[in-house]
């Protein structure tokens, strides 16, 4: 199977080609078709398996039809680093679509985020705490939301975000497509999936096997040498 077989909108397909994608990974092969068909999906896959594109590409394809200038897709991620990574993937793969993505996370000022939302982002990638701040201040409108993605749900649980996730879900339309991705499926995440997913398609890709695409290394080093070591590694 190749990416051409998914029959994406030409502007989305152009982003796939520009990224050099030819053969989809197992999670992409299994998850993209049911997402394109509008099903809720529960995906079990480790980081590094290509799951970001597995939900970004179908979302871009979907949003090519319909109104612009309002939030139609929301991706919730546990950390600002992951949120930024997803945002950059949307920007790269969706370069020809003219769909706009905005990131929402803490540690930075709210005003630039508010400005981006006012300018009409169709996709928002958010961390739970800062998203709730925007919801409370009514600086984000989620009433037109069509797709909700919970990425790395087990990490969000580990970080104590589950109560925030439940609060956010109460603020989004009941009629929506929901995608949940997790590397593991502890009981709390399984219960959450039962609450937020409707007749989901389950996609599982060797989620218990160690990844061969990620390498780890430890460098014991004195404090004053850390910066120079980091620069050398980069």
Image (cartoon, rainbow, N blue to C red):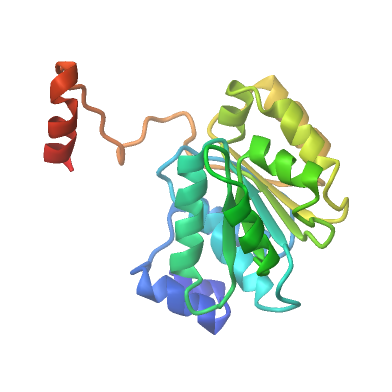
- Which residue does the image show at 47% across and 74% down from the upper left? 95
* Numbered marks: total: 0
Query: Percent x, y for residue 135?
Result: 78, 45
Picture quarter with the N terminus: bottom left
**In-front residue for pair 98/38:** 98
- Which residue does the image show at 69% across and 59% down from the upper left? 73
Q: Is residue 52 above or below residue 216?
A: below
Left or right of residue 138: residue 224: left
Query: Percent x, y for residue 93?
Result: 46, 68
**Which residue is situated farthest in the bottom direction here?**
10
Give the quadrant of residue 175: bottom right
- Which residue does the image show at 79% across and 33% down from the upper left? 166
Query: Percent x, y for residue 134?
Result: 73, 46
**In-front residue for pair 229/110:** 110
Query: Percent x, y for residue 174?
Result: 88, 50
Left or right of residue 25: residue 169: right
Left or right of residue 133: residue 207: left
Whether residue 133 can be seen here? yes
Picture quarter with the C terminus: top left
Give the quadrant of residue 100: bottom right
- Which residue does the image show at 66% across and 35% down from the upper left? 129
Whether residue 1 can be seen here? no
């Amino acid at each position: 199977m190749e990416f051409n077989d998914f029959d994406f909108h030409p502007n989305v397909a152009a982003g796939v080609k520009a990224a050099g994608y030819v053969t989809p990974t197992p999670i992409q092969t299994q998850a993209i078709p049911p997402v394109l068909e509008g099903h809720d999906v529960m995906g079990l896959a480790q980081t590094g398996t290509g799951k970001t594109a597995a939900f970004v590409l179908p979302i871009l394809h979907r949003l090519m039809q319909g109104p612009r200038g309002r939030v139609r897709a929301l991706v919730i991620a546990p950390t600002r680093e992951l949120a930024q990574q997803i945002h950059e993937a949307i920007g790269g793969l969706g370069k020809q679509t003219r769909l706009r993505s905005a990131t929402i996370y803490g540690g930075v000022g709210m005003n630039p985020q508010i400005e981006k939302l006012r300018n009409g982002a169709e996709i928002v990638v958010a961390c739970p705490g800062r998203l709730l701040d925007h919801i409370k201040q009514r600086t984000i409108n989620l009433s037109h939301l069509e797709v909700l993605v919970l990425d790395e749900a087990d990490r969000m649980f580990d970080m104590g975000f589950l109560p925030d996730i439940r609060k956010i879900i109460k603020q989004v339309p009941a009629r929506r497509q929901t995608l949940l991705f997790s590397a593991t499926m502890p009981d709390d995440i399984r219960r959450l999936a039962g609450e937020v997913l409707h007749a989901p398609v389950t996609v599982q890709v060797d989620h218990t096997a160690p990844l061969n695409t990620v390498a780890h290394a430890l460098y014991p080093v004195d404090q004053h040498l850390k910066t120079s070591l980091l620069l050398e590694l980069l």
